[in-house]
Every structure is written in C-alpha cells, then in structure tokens.
Amino acid sequence: MDDVILQVHDLRKHYQYQGSRIDVLQGAGLYVNKGEILAVVGKSGVGKSTLLHIMGTLDRPDAGTVLFKGQDIFQMNEDQRVRFRNKHLGFVFQFHHLLPEFTALENVALPALIGGKPRTEAFGKARKLLDVLDIGDRCGHIPDTMSGGEQQRVALARALVMEPEIVLADEPTGNLDMKTSQEVHALFVKINQEFHTTFVMATHSRSLAKIAHRAYTLANGVLQEGMLV
Ligand SMILES: Nc1ncnc2c1ncn2[C@@H]1O[C@H](COP(=O)(O)OP(=O)(O)OP(=O)(O)O)[C@@H](O)[C@H]1O
Ligand SMILES: [Mg+2]
C-alpha cells in the first residue's frame, strides 16, 4: 500500500476584499503519497496558491485540517510550526526570491546556515546540489548574472538543501520559456528519482502536470482527482 505523507481534509478559506467575500476553498481535500510528484491544476484564480500556502503553513485555513504523517500542523504552536517548516518543507515559487546580493552558492547554503549547520557542511551540500542541477560552474554568480532557468535551478537547490521530505512548488516554471521549462521539469524528475523527494506542484502548465504521477484539479473550491482541465 502507498505510504501517505500528507492529508488535507475539508479545507475552507475565504478572503474579504473591499466589502466583497471570495470563497476560495470550500471543502478541498487531497492526500499525498510519500515519494510521488503530485500536480494541482486549475484555471487562474481558482485558489492553487492559496492551497499550497496553507499546506506549507504560510497561511491558515478558516477550517479543515492538514495532517503531516498524521500530525495536525495547525495544532502546533508558532515555534513548533516554524521548526516543522524548516525541517520538513521546501518551497519553490514562480519568482525565485533569491537574495540579489548573494552568490548562487550562498543563496543555497543560507537555509542550512540559519538551521545551524556548520559552514563546511552547509557550503559542501550547496555545492553538491548545484552540481546535481548542472550549474556547479555558476556557484560564484549573483542572481542578476544568471538566466531565468539557472536562477530557478538555484531556487530548487535552495529548497532541497535541508533535505525536506516535501517540496511545494507554485508555478515553478511559470516564468520560463518552453525549452527552459522542460529542462527544469526534467530536473524535478531527476531529484524525485535520486532523493525520493515528494513534490506537490501547482501549475497551469499541462506539460509540467504530465511529469506528475497523479494530479488533482481544483475548481469551484474543491479538488477532484485527475487532470480535468
Ligand atoms: N490576500 C487576498 N485578498 C483578497 N483576495 C485574494 C487574496 N489572495 C488571493 N485572493 C483571491 O483569491 C483567489 C485565489 O487566488 P490564488 O492566488 O490562490 O489563485 P491561483 O489558482 O493560484 O491563481 P494563478 O493560477 O493565477 O496563480 C483569486 O480570485 C484571488 O483574487
Ligand atoms: Mg497561483
């Protein structure tokens, strides 16, 4: 039987904006198997980012639960949640959010240094990941002197440096051209196969969704298994 690592039950989330109410999630549920690449697809504005932010504890739901290995992550106190996030989760966003004044190597090593790893270990791990992602020769570059695809590979390396069990990726190739996107997609597959990292990716890209083992479609506030758009 598959090993479920994350379970989402009956999530509800609304936003109130300029006097009107937007009900984004209205009872959304899903499960994630350990080691799989899961895609969440759906039209723009349906709530994919909202869902991923909640799954990543960056936002809170109005109601519902998110269980990581059976533990309710919203029952943790703030300190526990921050520790949980640093230890178990990695994030990749559409815009990479790399620190502009730091080199690729420093950007990747930073979460490990903040997490208390010794310098040699943090930088050694960062270098190894940049090598795996085929940009070892860009270690000393700052983000502005790298292409979009290279920057996104640095962001992926940064997400992986703490060896998270799950990487949440929100439109990770939304900002890249088709060819570069496909190269980055291939790297997700490579990382998944080499390190057994679990990925949850929100995307409108059918080609990205195709590399996933399973998909859910988000529409009208709920999730249905399959790629229905
Ligand atoms: N802070 C906010 N305040 C008010 N409304 C919001 C807020 N954040 C998101 N929304 C609204 O909630 C809905 C869902 O937004 P979300 O960003 O989750 O969609 P998405 O599926 O990720 O879209 P896209 O594919 O364009 O990235 C949208 O209609 C958006 O306008
Ligand atoms: Mg989004």
Image (cartoon, rainbow, N blue to C red):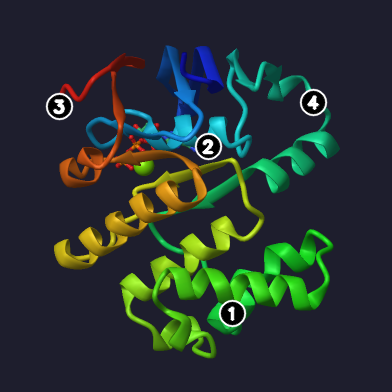
Camera-nearest label, 3 or 1 = 1
Image disc number at residue 53 = 2
Name the residue tied to disc 1.
Answer: 105
Ligand 1 positioned in quadrant:
top left
Q: CA distance from mark 3 to mark 2?
A: 22 Å
Q: Residue at x 52, y 64 (%)?
A: 157
Name the residue tied to disc 3.
Answer: 229
Q: Does dot 1 land on a helix, a strand or a loop?
A: helix
Left or right of 43: which side holds 58? right
From the top left corner, tell me how far across and down residue 174 is, in percent.
28, 55
The type of residue carrying mark 2 is His
Q: Nearer the viewer, residue 135 or 40?
A: 135
Q: Residues within 10 Å of mark 3 (few under 14, many from 20)?
A: few
Q: Nearer the viewer, residue 198 or 18?
A: 198
From the top left corner, tell me how far across and down residue 202 is, in percent.
35, 39
Q: CA distance from mark 2 to mark 1?
A: 26 Å
| Mark closest to the chain's N terminus, 3 or 1 | 1
Q: CA distance from mark 3 to mark 4?
A: 36 Å
| Mark closest to the chain's N terminus, 3 or 2 | 2
State whether label 2 is within 8 Å of ligand 1. yes
Residue 14 drawn above or below residue 158: above
The type of residue carrying mark 4 is Met
Name the residue tied to disc 4.
Answer: 76
| Mark closest to the chain's N terminus, 3 or 4 | 4
The type of residue carrying mark 3 is Val
Q: Does dot 3 land on a helix, a strand or a loop?
A: loop
Camera-nearest label, 2 or 1 = 1
Q: Residues within 10 Å of mark 2 (few under 14, many from 20)?
A: some
